[in-house]
Image (cartoon, rainbow, N blue to C red):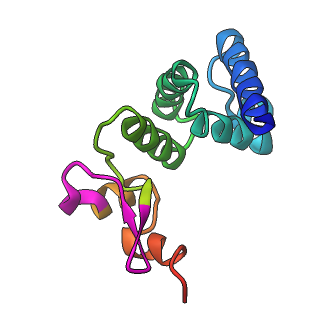
Amino acid sequence: MAGRRLTARHGDRLGEIMEEYGWPTAELIGEDAARAAWLIAQHADRQLDIRRRALKLLQAAVSAGSAGPRELAFLRDRTLVNEGGKQICGTQIAGVRDGAPVPWSCAEPERVDERRAEVGIEPFDEYVAKFSPS
């Protein structure tokens, strides 16, 4: 329970920051803090309003060139999966079958590696190899 409360507190604070400043970019708050903000948004599974706002603001920041498309891809996929949709870049893993990670459903799975390359993410097979027992 303490972990959930801490996550919620962090999500609430991120919501306040976004309300006042927009998406907390590295230029605004530094690389480490920007990464922490992204991680808070990424793991705000019980605060979908915070995640949706973060997604919208991060999309605008990426369009303006002040945030990276890789983080946007992960946040968008997680949001889609949490809301029952199909992910775009295959960043979210549903579980493990026969020792191999299995992604949640993807829209146009034949284009996943192409879309991953567009945002600077390694091909799916290389990505899941990191999670597979050697």
* Quarter of the figure with the N terminus: top right
Quarter of image, res 35: top right
Please determine whether, in this image, residue 124 is positioned above or below residue 111.
below
Task: Please state the horizontal and vertical placement of residue 37, each as a whole percent of the image.
Answer: 70, 34
Q: Is residue 32 magenta?
A: no
Task: Please state the horizontal and vertical placement of residue 125, each as a whole percent of the image.
Answer: 38, 75
How many numbered dots are placed on residues in this image?
A: 0
Task: Name the residue at the front extreme.
Answer: 1
Residue at 67% of width from left, 32% of height from top? 25
Residue at 54% of width from left, 84% of height from top? 133
Please determine whether, in this image, residue 118 is positioned above or below residue 2.
below
Task: Please state the horizontal and vertical placement of residue 22, each as a whole percent of the image.
Answer: 63, 17
Residues 66 and 81: in front is 81
Q: Is residue 108 magenta?
A: yes
Residues 127 and 11: in front is 11
Magenta range is 95-112
Residues 124 and 98: in front is 98
Task: Please state the horizontal and vertical placement of residue 5, each as a whole percent of the image.
Answer: 76, 29
Residue at 38% of width from left, 41% of height from top? 81
* Quarter of the figure with the C terminus: bottom right
Task: Name the residue at the top extreme.
Answer: 20
Residue at 28% of width from left, 59% of height from top? 112
Please determine whether, in this image, residue 41 is positioned above or below residue 114.
above
| Left or right for 51, reference 37 | left
| Left or right for 44, reference 29 | left
| Left or right for 3, reference 107 | right
